[in-house]
Amino acid sequence: MKRIFTSIGLVALLSCFSVFGDTSQNEGKLLALRALKIDAGSIKTVERDATGTRTIVKLVLNPAKGSNINVEVWLPDAEKWNARFLGLGNGGAAGKINSGNLAGASAGGYAVATTDMGTAPNSDSGIGNEEVWKDFGFRATHLMTVVGKQIVKAHYGKAPELSYFSGGSTGGQQALQEAQRYPEDYDGIAAAVAAHCRTPLHAYFLWNDQIVKKCPFTKSQDANVIAAANEYMASREIPIAAGKFVSDPRCTAQDIKAVIALARNKDATLTEEHAASLKKLFDGPRHAVTGERIFNGIPLGSSIEASHGHLYLFNWVFGKDKKLEDINFGADIDTYTAKLAPYLNAENPDLSAFAKRGGKLIMTLGTADAVVPYHASIDYYERVIECLGGLDQAQSFFRFYVVPGLAHGGGPGINQAPNLLDAVRTWRETGIAPFALHGHHTENGKTSWEMPIYPYPTQTGWNVTTKSFKPVDGKRGGVDRIAEHFRPAAVE
């Protein structure tokens, strides 16, 4: 018995030393990170999280007077790290950090970072503050990336083998800014429902807002207009979409006229004033003096209610004293564009530097999305094709997927889009380009159907004989190009 006790005691004693050793080693790493010097900023806290499996670093960057960028970097323990760095995008006007997204990514093995984009505590931080415009437009994401990699190297003793960025909506703006301005930052980029054409997009929000304030639409009227579009476009659809959602909203002025007429037949409460407003909403904003295209209109089959609001950028330029309904689409929109577009828009089609270093990029947009409509992304992709000399050249590193029936979260068609990060990582690390991605429609938490999505311009067709999906040639373009005046060159 004495010998057994001695053995057990020895094991316990060794375990104790092991625990003390691990604790000492962890504390040493924490102290080293707390003492780390970073450019134009400071580390605020370095702590182990409650799970005891990762280290969380919180810091602030101040690259200029008036700039205050919060960043968090979550570091899984070395044995759990996949040797990859992941930058995560934000949403809306940002101003906060989503710890849930960081927790999920770090649990998956990534050393992961995100930023509030310098707009804390809320979007009013950008009123009259050019430094916040720069941070929100591009600077915060790049600096987050630089310091994030510095922290990774300090913590693990080596740089990440590969780096990826994943973001949607505003995060898609961040994603394309990275590919365009800082092609060396990331090896692979996933840009979901990308709000890259930022200032024209918010001009679209204002255009719609001014219209619906003068001529409101009830939820029932909105639903009936959507139903009319679905019905009118049904003859062009495959069976799974016909009458339920619009998988390709590209249309003519005659189509818009017919949808409005059908909507009025379905809903007697839609007046002549509603009809005139719908025509403007579906057409989209143009310059009041020159007639130049600022942005395209609400996609057929998507929500009017979702298409307006988000007007904080106009407060940034004009302050809160100017009434939003008084902002005109002549001189005012020119002023707004000149001040913000060179910082916020991610519209440069020359991605040759990103392609040359082996970068891979996947971008998506949903056909039922009235918050970030598909038009600008089709136009952008077409300009990339033109810039790089052809579709094959663009698709060698950049694939664009138009997702049928996806809205800005949810949607009547595909409402569970594919995992773009996994797709872009597989492409970058195996060299095998993706073709069909699979989207799902879920109801009550269960998948009711799934559907392949093919890279633009290929579309999803239907084989009547085999009753199965098939890829079919789709048309190119088909959207009005936003005038260059509203897409000025980027500046630092």
Image (tube, rainbow, N blue to C red):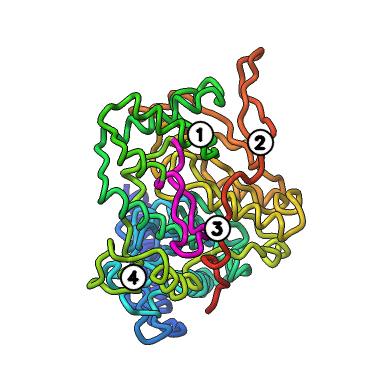
In this view, 319 is above or below 204: below
Q: Which mark is residue 482?
A: 3
Relative vertical location of residue 148 with respect to residue 225 in this rendering, above or below = below
Within the magenta stretch, is there residue 287? yes
Q: Which mark is residue 255?
A: 1
Q: Residues within 10 Å of mark 2 (few under 14, many from 20)?
A: some
Give percent across and percent down for residue 186. Answer: 59, 64
Query: How far apart, in angstroms, are the residues tagged by discs 2 and 1?
Result: 19 Å
Residue farthest to the bottom, as pictured: 65
- For the magenta stretch, what is the residue range? 280-300
Q: Position of residue 73 (x, y in %)?
A: 42, 66
What residue is shown with label 4?
119
- Which of marks 3 and 2 precedes in the sequence? 2
Label 3 with label 1: CB-CB less than 8 Å? no
| Distance of label 4 from label 2 (alpha carbons) | 41 Å
Name the amino acid, label 4: Thr
Q: Say what secondary structure mark 3 lies in.
A: loop
* Vertical relation: 415 (above or below) 355: above
Magenta stretch containing residue 291, yes or no? yes
Looking at the image, which residue sits at the far left?
A: 321
In this image, 98 relative to 475: left or right? left
Q: Nearer the viewer, residue 278 or 103?
A: 278
Q: Secondary structure at mark 1?
A: helix
Residue wearing tag 2: 474
